[in-house]
């Protein structure tokens, strides 16, 4: 229930650009917990405590980001930063949301590539890998329980699993097919493709906000075709300039050029969150380009789960390992090749997110209507569940039978995975907590084996 007018808090003071800058920088270092945790963190801080933006305006922005491809939490930060302080406010908010994670991941990836063969480190990774598999299975359950609300959507999920598991159909084809099914279904069975609601309750009031429900749209947030065209040309020119530079320097078939092209496509297919695009990144990075191995992909996901920022930042790990593996600048400069790969992957993955907000948000502010999932997106989300299950099956195979079915079964890994899933499902243990616990178990198990041998 809202507070009475007599006891309502006073409106907060206007927020300076540098005050907002400090908050976005802080958020970049503490944004653990995946998109749900990151959105909740921003809601608690910006809506409830600081009152920089009202509940309704926050939800209005969130509804828009949820229908976009890309990391919705980062796009929400861009939207709020842009609404408060214009173009540079959005750029700063979105950049600082991922920049700390990029530097942390590059450092951890370098350590991983240098020291992963040391028994203690190998033991830690041994404990983490089944935990990651359990986390992916739990993600499939969590997304599926919300997305698969009827038998038709469940059938789409099953067909997507069969398509990628049995027929090895590329991920983009699955996404397009599911979108077409949703588009067609919206005309004949619209009740089957109704979108669900987000978990945050938008009916509560926390008092007056800097950007309140009735606060007029600022001048920089008004839709203008001239501004739209300038942003579109700037974004496309930036993409084209960097791609051209890479193509001239390394040829079109060069590793960095192919990374730019591949991660551009990946950025446009991240409907449903990071777990949805992981199978596509796996298909490209592991199977097609051979930038890294399946085992390294699992290890990279573990690092991504334990660092701040969006989980899709695993692309920085893939880029770093890819640059290192291909020895782009020779055997003596592997670390520079890794850094170049990580930066390339990050730039092309996140550039579309800024464009989606700077181009589309003014129109969203002008309409101020609720933005809901479209029927094609509902179909895509259902297919994503099946694709994630396939990813979990693939990871489980590599973790439990590292030498193939002809080799020994890793029973201890199976126990760790089962216990991790139970902890996530039954006791709602946090992902970072679960991974740290499993890393400790793996470390202790490696020491035990060393003493026994």
Image: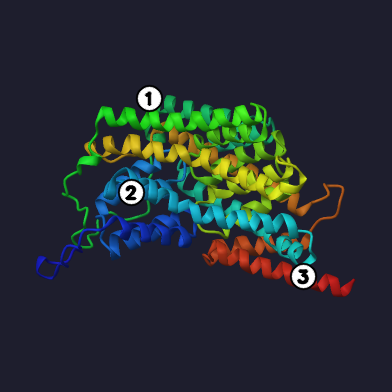
Q: Residues within 10 Å of mark 3 (few under 14, many from 20)?
A: some
Residue 299 x, y percent position in the rendering: 68, 54
- Kindly tell me whether residue 62 is visible in this rendering: no
Image height of 257 relative to 121, above or below:
above
Between the C-alphas of marks 2 and 1, the distance is 40 Å
Q: Which mark is residue 89?
A: 2
Q: Secondary structure at mark 1?
A: helix
Count of numbered circles on the image: 3
Residue 387 position (above or below residue 1): above
SS state under label 2: helix
Which residue, given by chain and number where applicable, does mark 1 sit on? 187
In this view, the mark in front (3 or 2):
2
Q: How is the image coloured?
A: rainbow
Q: Earlier in the sequence, mark 2 or mark 1?
A: 2
Q: Residue at x 63, y 32 (%)?
A: 258
* Side of 78 relative to 436 (left or right): left
For numbered disc 3, what is the local secondary structure? Answer: helix
- Sequence-wise, the earlier of marks 3 and 1 is 1
CA–CA distance between discs 3 and 1?
Answer: 57 Å
Give 275 or 149, whichever is nearer the viewer: 275
Q: Residue at x 46, y 33 (%)?
A: 238
Question: Earlier along the polypeptide chain: callout 3 or callout 2?
Answer: 2
Q: Which mark is residue 445?
A: 3
């Amino acid at each position: 229930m809202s507070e009475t007018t007599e006891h309502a808090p006073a409106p907060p003071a206007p927020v300076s650009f540098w005050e907002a800058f400090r908050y976005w920088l802080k958020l970049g270092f503490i944004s653990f917990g995946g998109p749900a945790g990151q959105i909740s963190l921003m809601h608690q801080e910006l809506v409830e405590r600081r009152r920089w933006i009202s509940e309704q305006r926050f939800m209005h922005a969130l509804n828009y980001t949820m229908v976009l491809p890309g990391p919705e939490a980062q796009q929400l930060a861009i939207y709020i930063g842009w609404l408060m302080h214009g173009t540079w406010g959005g750029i700063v908010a979105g950049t600082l949301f991922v920049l700390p994670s990029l530097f942390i991941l590059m450092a951890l990836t370098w350590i991983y590539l240098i020291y992963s063969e040391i028994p203690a480190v190998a033991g830690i990774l041994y404990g983490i890998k089944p935990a990651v598999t359990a986390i992916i299975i739990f993600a499939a359950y969590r997304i599926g329980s919300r997305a698969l609300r009827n038998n038709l959507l469940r059938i789409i999920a099953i067909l997507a699993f069969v398509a990628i598991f049995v027929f090895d159909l590329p991920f983009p084809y699955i996404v397009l097919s599911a979108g077409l099914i949703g588009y067609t279904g919206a005309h004949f069975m619209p009740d089957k493709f109704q979108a669900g609601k987000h978990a945050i309750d938008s009916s509560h009031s926390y008092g007056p906000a800097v950007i309140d429900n009735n606060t007029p749209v600022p001048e920089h947030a008004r839709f203008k075709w001239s501004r739209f065209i300038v942003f579109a040309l700037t974004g496309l020119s930036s993409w084209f300039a960097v791609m051209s530079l890479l193509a001239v320097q390394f040829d079109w078939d060069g590793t960095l050029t192919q990374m730019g092209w591949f991660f551009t496509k990946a950025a446009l297919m991240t409907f449903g969150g990071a777990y949805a695009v992981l199978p596509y990144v796996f298909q490209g990075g592991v199977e097609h380009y051979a930038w890294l191995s399946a085992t390294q992909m699992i290890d990279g996901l573990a690092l991504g789960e334990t660092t701040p920022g969006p989980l899709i930042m695993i692309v920085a790990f893939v880029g770093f390992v890819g640059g290192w593996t291909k020895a782009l600048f020779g055997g003596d400069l592997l670390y520079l090749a890794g850094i170049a790969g990580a930066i390339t992957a990050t730039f092309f993955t996140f550039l579309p997110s800024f464009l989606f907000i700077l181009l589309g948000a003014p129109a969203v502010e002008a309409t101020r209507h609720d933005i809901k999932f479209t029927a094609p997106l509902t179909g895509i989300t259902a297919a994503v569940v099946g694709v994630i299950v396939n990813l979990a099956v693939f990871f489980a195979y590599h973790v439990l039978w590292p030498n193939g079915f002809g080799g020994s079964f890793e029973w201890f890994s199976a126990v760790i995975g089962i216990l991790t899933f139970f902890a996530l499902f039954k006791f709602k243990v946090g992902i970072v907590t679960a991974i740290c616990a499993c890393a400790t178990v793996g470390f202790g198990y490696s020491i035990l084996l060393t003493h026994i041998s």
